[in-house]
Amino acid sequence: MTIERRLARADFTLSRDYPVAVERVWDSFAEEKQKLAWWGGGDAVTPSEWAFDFRVGGRDVAEGQFHDGPISRYEATYTDIVEHNRIVTTYDMWLDGIHMSTSVASLEFEPLVEGTRFTHVEHGVFFDQFWADGANRETGTRGLLDALGKYLA
């Protein structure tokens, strides 16, 4: 079987206003127990590996199997952290052991009178058979931001 070698790029920006202080939103990313409470697929995923090292140069890993579906693996490296202001990561995704993408994501935390504006900007490169998955990544990230909103409520 021949694998068609392709690359595709996808960029997106998502913003959410959360009615809580910047420190509360920040801690949802910076504290492991809090991140575990909202990150990932919830009941739709059976987790198999988790690592959390929130510092510049630190790595996060989240792997799990979707019920009756594929194994998803996320590996991120923190490249920049400015407390209560921004987090920048590079991360790779695998699906059933096949490298599907590499992304750079910036997470920005802006104080508002009534809470926090959170902005996620992502630039991704999708490989080979995953070349058309950019829209799915944006949809998945929307789901994560919705889960964060429910967690913060």
Image: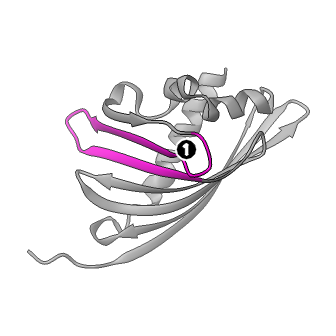
134 sits left or right of 67 in the view: right
Query: Is 50 part of what is drawn in magenta?
Result: no
Q: Whole-percent x and y of residue 86?
A: 73, 48
Residue type at numbered disc 1:
Arg
Which region is colored magenta?
54-78
Where is mark 1, residue-wise? 142
How many numbered discs sit on the rendered protein?
1
Q: Is residue 153 above or below residue 91?
A: above
Q: Give the dominant element type of the magenta stretch: helix, strand or loop.
A: strand
Residue drawn at the location 59% of the way across and 60% of the way down: 12
35 sits left or right of 40 in the view: right
151 sits left or right of 127 in the view: right
| Residue 71 figure quarter | top left
Residue drawn at the location 70% of the way across and 34% of the way down: 26
* Residue reaching furthest to the top: 153
Front in this rendered view, residue 138 or 99: 99
Residue drawn at the location 49% of the way across and 33% of the way down: 39
Q: Is residue 123 above or below residue 93?
A: below
Q: Whole-percent x and y of residue 84?
A: 77, 39
86 sits left or right of 47 in the view: right
Dot 1 falls on a residue whose secondary structure is helix
Q: Pick the quarter of the image with the C terminus.
A: top right
Q: Pick the quarter of the image with the N terminus.
A: bottom left
Q: Whole-percent x and y of residue 152?
A: 66, 23
Front in this rendered view, residue 37 or 59: 59
Front in this rendered view, residue 86 or 125: 86
Q: Whole-percent x and y of residue 78?
A: 58, 51
* Residue reaching furthest to the right: 113
Query: Is 74 part of what is drawn in magenta?
Result: yes
The colour scheme is: one colour
10 Å crowding of disc 1: few (<14), some (14-19), many (20+): some
